[in-house]
Image (cartoon, helix red, strand yellow):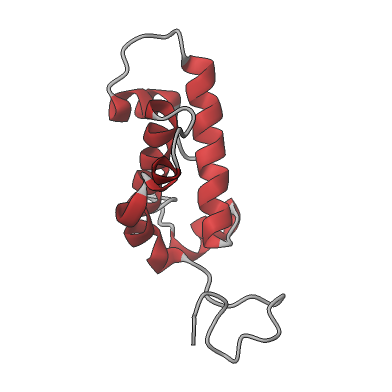
Amino acid sequence: MIWTTLAYIKQHSRICCDGEDGTLELYGAAAEKTVMNYLERDYDDIVGTFGTDEQPVPEPIRQATLMLVDVSYMQRSPVTVQNLYLVGYGFDALLKPYMRLTSDNNENNNGYGKHCNL
């Protein structure tokens, strides 16, 4: 894990035991990678663009990561299609301001950015 710690995950998810530390570390690493993929940014880009000396990774990105870890922990395997969307609006609302809107790989974006539906 890069910006998430096991102690912070356990505090956020209110987990007291140590028996699932390996699983939580896996979920934390996967959540960070998922957030970076969602934002289309790597760690250095996030820190260089949005970070400060006091806070290299902004709080909304850290919170969205913790939300994703918590959902992964609580819903280890989706049983229905509805369970695939449990993170929902809060996750998007936290991360959208940090998303890369254009990409060099996207030649046909008409100047609106890759995620625009215009």
Question: How many numbered discs, if any?
Answer: 0
Q: Position of residue 47 (x, y in %)?
A: 50, 56
Image vertical order of residue 118 relative to residue 106, above or below? below
Q: Nearer the viewer, residue 76 or 115?
A: 76
Q: Name which quarter of the figure residue 26 lies in.
A: top right
Relative height, residue 45 to residue 22 (above, below): below
The reply, left or right, for residue 55 in relation to residue 27 is: left
User: Is the residue 76 above or below the residue 85 in the image?
Assistant: above
Q: Nearer the viewer, residue 21 or 59?
A: 21
Q: Give residue 87's position: percent from left, percent from top.
A: 37, 46
Query: What residue is drawn where x is 38% and y is 49%?
Result: 55
Residue 75 visible, this orientation: yes
- Is 89 left or right of 36, judged from the image as shown? left
Residue occupying the point 48% across, 40% down: 3
Give 41 or 80, whichever is nearer the viewer: 80
Q: Residue at x 55, y 35 (%)?
A: 29
- Residue 2 is at least partly visible in this image: no
Q: Position of residue 6 (x, y in %)?
A: 44, 24
Q: Is residue 17 above or below residue 85?
A: above
Write the residue at 40% across / 48% down.
85
Q: In the rendered view of the protein, which quadrant contains the N terminus?
A: top right
Toward the bottom, the furthest residue is 110
